[in-house]
Amino acid sequence: MNDERKRILEMVSDGTITPSEGARLLDALGSSGRGRDRGGKPGRKTLVEASAMLSEIGPMIQETMGDIFRGSRKQDPLGSLDFQEYDSYQGELPEGRDIVIHGTMNRGKSISISLGRSEDSQLRASVDGGEQPVNLCENKGRTMVMWKEGNLSVQVPDTAGSVTVVSRGGTIEATGLRVPSTLNTMGGSIGIYKPGASFSAKTMGGSLDITIDGAWSAGSKAKAWAAEYQ
């Protein structure tokens, strides 16, 4: 298995894309003709040049390959959850509660997320100042947040157990978080600024920008397609 295929399987494993979407991504990139199998069956197209290709198409994923990353409604595991729609949300977060945030783009739209530190025990979330809806639900002891369009702003209290973001496109920025974070995006960049806890970051087709000060703790890692920093 070459490195490119392994990384796509990693994105499937961490939930950034579904297994079906991963298979479709491999097929779509292979059919582009950018690379062919070395030593495999004649005529079989593969991802030999996928690293360079993803670097080129990362900003264009939403437009050129949106169907792959959105997937169908039937394949979306979030579709079975009972989300409530809010213009903006503010509520007490139980101590130790994990926050899981999913970005799933509406067709032809763009998404991004900004995470910041809450000064109290309140979780706050809104999209473009309340102009677009944000959806929340409780599932298996976790607070689930989902949005489909625009920039989502979330203030995370220090009482949270952790925060996980899985975004199918769009940028992720996290500033001053004091809880462990896992940040994954397909086709967007990740910025992590002055974290006060461990983090894991992974982007396919985007860049990484990390600023660390004395509040950071060890045990973190970040990947940008072909590069890894620890």
Image (spheres, rainbow, N blue to C red):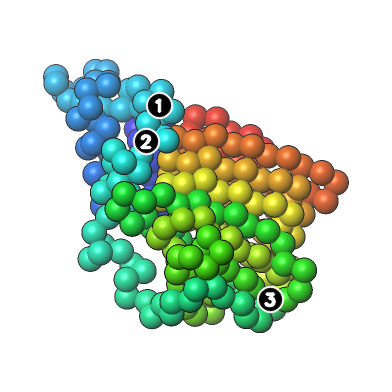
Q: Is residue 187 left or right of residue 66?
A: right
Toward the left, the furthest residue is: 42
> Is disc 2 in contact with disc 1, using a CB cutoff of under 8 Å?
yes
Q: Is residue 112 left or right of residue 11?
A: right
Q: Quadrant of residue 153?
A: bottom right
Q: Is residue 38 visible?
A: yes
Q: Is residue 26 left or right of 17 when viewed as pictured?
A: left
The CA span between labels 2 and 1 is 8 Å
Amino acid found under the numbered disc labelled 2: Met
**Which residue: 29% across, 53% down?**
107
Amino acid type, residue under disc 3 in the picture: Gln
Q: At which x and y percent is residue 69?
A: 32, 49
How many C-alpha atoms fall within 10 Å of the one at disc 1: few (<14), some, or many (≥20)?
few
Q: Give SS at disc 1.
A: helix
Q: Secondary structure at mark 2?
A: helix
Tell me the residue that label 1 is attached to.
56
Q: Are marks 1 and 3 in contact (CB under 8 Å)?
A: no
Q: Residue at x 27, y 21 (%)?
A: 34
Q: Which residue is mark 3?
A: 122
- Sort mark 2 into few (<14), some (14-19) or many (20+) by Cα contacts within 10 Å: some
Label 3, residues with CA under 10 Å away: few <14, some 14-19, many ≥20: some
Instruction: Kindly identify which numbered label has been placed on residue 60.
Output: 2
Residue 6 seen in render: no
Q: Quadrant of the C terminus?
A: top right
Q: Quadrant of residue 4?
A: top left
Where's residue 12, x and y in %? Answer: 38, 50
The CA distance from mark 2 to mark 3 is: 36 Å
**Position of residue 46 measured from the top left corner of the image (x, y, whole percent):** 26, 27
Find the residue positioned furthest to the right.
214
Q: CA distance from mark 1 to mark 3?
A: 40 Å
Q: Which quadrant: the N terminus?
A: top left
